[in-house]
Image: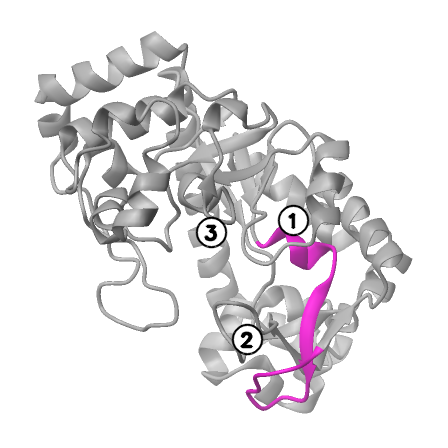
């Protein structure tokens, strides 16, 4: 129904006729009758997409491959979710991120704000439905911006804004209680938490109590200027070289100042590449071995870093034709025929028990 109405009106549901915007039962019934053919089309289309997805997942699962997905922290204001559950969202405020060491004005994402009190009154029915659906789609999934499920940063008003704002809930005990409720709703053995960025210590402590792994990104695991040894990372963690928002390890390594590179190569296991001023295959393999050998329950390596390539997925804060357009530079058949790469990665997995 939402898809058919959106196609008809060609604008946000907030700008639809008032009776449809308010979801008046008579208006909805009339729309279902008038748009029956388009509703049937969208139903058919979504059914095929769902069927094809589950067939594909079954096929790859049969090969011993798991599919990991993503559960976004928020949803768009112009979405079926918000239209159908308007009482659970504030449309007169905007979700974002507070000022931090990387941005003195913070970020404005322009998304509606959860009304946590209303959601709690309904026992988080909508969030539970999201969790069930994600579990049906994926073998495991990443909860995006997990700190926002403990405390959501927002600014009043509908116009874009940066700078100071507020958290909801406002007090730490309430934030912990809310976050742990949300993570229990979303939780299970198939969940990991994206706990990167400015994350209060109490969030990671809470995730540990709930036995939900968070991320350990090699380049960010530091105590001031000293890199933490991956061999000492907790088992309840996800080891990785970078994220979709970072440059490749190759570019990161080459751009490091000499002092930082020296500190990086002081990690046990990297001494053999300490004299390498430029990234090469030996540095690639030493970094991969470091993470594969860590105690982390899960090691997720970006495809580019597994190959030692330099392509990038996304540059945050920019809008370009290249962002989110990454494709492998070779076909699956070409990759399978690359005996050096497949042998190298297989050997790495076997040596480290991965």
Which of discs 2 and 3 lies nearer the camera? The answer is 2
Task: Judge the density around disc 3: few (<14), some (14-19), many (≥20) Cα neighbours within 10 Å.
Answer: few
Badge 1 local density, few (<14 within 10 Å), some, or many (20+)? some
Element type at mark 2: loop
The quadrant of the picture occupied by the N terminus is: bottom right
Judging by the rendered image, the residue that carries numbered circle 2 is 106
Nearest to the observer: residue 227 or residue 51: 227
Against 327, residue 52 (above or below) is: above
Q: Which residues are magenta?
A: 145-165
Q: Quadrant of residue 162?
A: bottom right
* Observer-nearest of 201 and 157: 201
Q: Is residue 1 visible?
A: no
- Tell us which disc is closer to us: 2 or 1: 2
Between 11 and 284, which is closer to the camera in this rendering? 284
Does label 2 or label 3 sit earlier along the sequence? 3
**x, y percent for residue 310:** 18, 47
Does the magenta portion include 246? no
Q: Which quadrant does the C terminus fall into?
A: top left
Task: Looking at the image, tell me whether mark 1 or mark 3 is earlier in sequence order.
Answer: 3
Q: Position of residue 192 (x, y in %)?
A: 58, 37
Residue placed under numbered mark 1 in the picture: 130
Judge by depth and name the residue closer to the eye, 189 or 76. Answer: 189
Secondary structure, mark 1, is helix
Query: Which of the 4 quarters of the picture holds residue 118?
Result: bottom right
- For the point 90% across and 59% down, which residue is it? 121
Q: CA distance from mark 2 to mark 3?
A: 37 Å
Please give the residue where the numbered disc 3 appears in the rendered image.
Answer: 46
Asked whether residue 353 appears in the rendered view, the answer is yes
Q: Mark 1 or mark 2, which is nearer the start of the sequence?
A: 2
Above or below, comparing residue 339 to residue 264 in the picture? above
Give me the residue at 49% from left, 73% from top.
103
Please provide percent x and percent y for residue 292: 39, 22
């Amino acid at each position: 129904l939402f898809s058919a109405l959106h196609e008809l009106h060609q604008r946000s549901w907030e700008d639809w006729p008032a009776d449809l915007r308010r979801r008046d039962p008579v208006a909805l019934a009339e729309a279902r009758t008038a748009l029956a053919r388009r509703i049937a089309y969208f139903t058919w289309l979504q059914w095929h997409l769902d069927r094809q997805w589950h067939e594909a997942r079954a096929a790859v699962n049969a090969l011993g491959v798991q599919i990991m997905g993503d559960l976004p922290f928020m949803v768009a204001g112009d979405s079926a979710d918000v239209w159908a559950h308007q009482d659970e969202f504030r449309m007169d405020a905007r979700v974002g991120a507070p000022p931090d060491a990387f941005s003195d004005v913070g970020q404005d994402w322009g998304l509606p704000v959860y009304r946590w009190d209303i959601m709690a009154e309904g026992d988080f029915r909508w969030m539970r439905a999201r969790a069930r659906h994600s579990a049906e789609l994926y073998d495991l999934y990443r909860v995006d911006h997990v700190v926002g499920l403990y405390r959501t940063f927002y600014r009043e008003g509908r116009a874009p804004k940066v700078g100071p704002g507020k958290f909801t809930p406002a007090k730490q005990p309430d934030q912990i209680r809310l976050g742990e409720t949300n993570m229990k709703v979303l939780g299970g053995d198939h969940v990991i938490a994206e706990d990167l960025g400015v994350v209060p210590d109490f969030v990671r402590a809470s995730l540990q109590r709930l036995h939900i792994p968070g991320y350990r990104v090699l380049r960010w695991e530091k105590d001031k200027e000293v890199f933490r040894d991956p061999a000492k990372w907790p088992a309840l963690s996800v080891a990785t070289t970078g994220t979709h928002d970072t440059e490749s390890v190759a570019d990161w390594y080459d751009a490091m100042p000499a002092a930082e590179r020296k500190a990086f190569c002081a990690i046990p296991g990297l001494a053999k590449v300490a004299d390498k001023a430029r990234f090469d295959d030996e540095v690639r393999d030493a970094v991969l071995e470091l993470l594969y050998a860590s105690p982390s329950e899960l090691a997720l390596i970006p495809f580019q870093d597994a190959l030692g390539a330099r392509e990038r997925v996304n540059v945050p804060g920019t809008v370009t034709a290249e962002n989110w357009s990454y494709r492998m530079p070779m076909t699956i058949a070409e990759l399978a025929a690359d005996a050096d790469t497949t042998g190298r990665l297989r050997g790495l997995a076997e040596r480290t028990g991965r």
